[in-house]
Every structure is written in structure tokens, then in C-alpha cells.
Amino acid sequence: MLNTELQPTVEAPAQPAIEPLVHLSDAAAGKLQELTKEEANPQIGLRVYVYSGGCSGFRYGMMLEDQPTPEDVTIESNGVKVYVDGQSTQYLTGSEIDYVDTLMGAGFTVNNPNAVSACGCGSSFRTEESAGSPGGCSH
């Protein structure tokens, strides 16, 4: 006699989704790979940071970096190393960096879910935790 009794299966509990620190769009990764293709250093990456300034309180900074510092969080997104200092992680978690090329100009942009408002010219941002309110644009 064939046993056709079904056995209950136990599924592993779903793991909570971990929000990426920073994600590079295909366009941003492609532009960075183009900019660094002649580099022999395999550690070269994009440093992304947040600093005080601008009308809304915080500004983004980006530059190519030869290697991370011991305090950096290092991630790889779309084949590009990204270095973020510990202080900036709280402001950048979940952000996407894109590269746009329009009639008005070309450059990297940050789509940041933590920014609740931005300067009129778009060069600075404010988070919910930021003290005060944005002032007039001085750019």
C-alpha cells in the first residue's frame, strides 16, 4: 500500500528586509566605471559624505577615493565600491545615487528618502531630525 499522507512543511520565518546603505543606479555605476577604467588601483571607489552647510542644513559631497579609512562602511553597488563615513550613514541610508545628463548639465544626484525638504536650488537638504527650518536660498 502506498502512503500518500501529506506531511506538513515548516517554512523558515521571513527575514526582515535590510535596507541598503546606498545604491548606485546603472547610469551612475557606468559613469564611475568610465571615469576609473584607467586606474590600476582595485580599491578605488566613490566616497559619499554629508556635511553641514547650505540653506537647508546639510550638503552632499562625493569624490573618488584611493582606499577606505578604518572608520568607513564599504559597500559594493553595481560593481563599484562606495565608501561612507560612520557619521554620514544616518543621513544616507536608503539613498540612490544617479547620474543624469540633460540640457541643463550633467552630474550625480542623490535621491534620499531621509530628506524632508531641500533648498530651492537643490544643493542642500534637511532631515526630520534637523533643528530649525530651511532658510532662504543663498546660492
Image: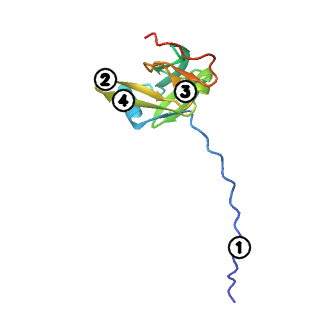
Q: Mark 4 points at which residue?
A: 100
Farthest top residue in view: 138
Label 1's element? Answer: loop
Q: 126 or 95: nearer the eye?
A: 126
| Vertical placement of residue 8 versus 25, above or below | below
Q: Which amino acid does label 1 sit on?
A: Gln
Q: Nearer the viewer, mark 4 or mark 1?
A: 4
Q: Nearer the viewer, residue 54 or 92?
A: 54
Residue beneath disc 2: 104
Three-letter amino acid code of the residue under disc 3: Ala
Cα separation, mark 4 vs mark 1, equals 54 Å
Residue type of the residue flagged with mark 2: Met
The colour scheme is: rainbow
Res. 85 image quadrant: top right
Q: What element carries label 4?
A: strand
Question: In the image, what residue occupies the spot 41% across and 26% down?
Answer: 108
Task: Give me the disc on residue 115.
Answer: 3
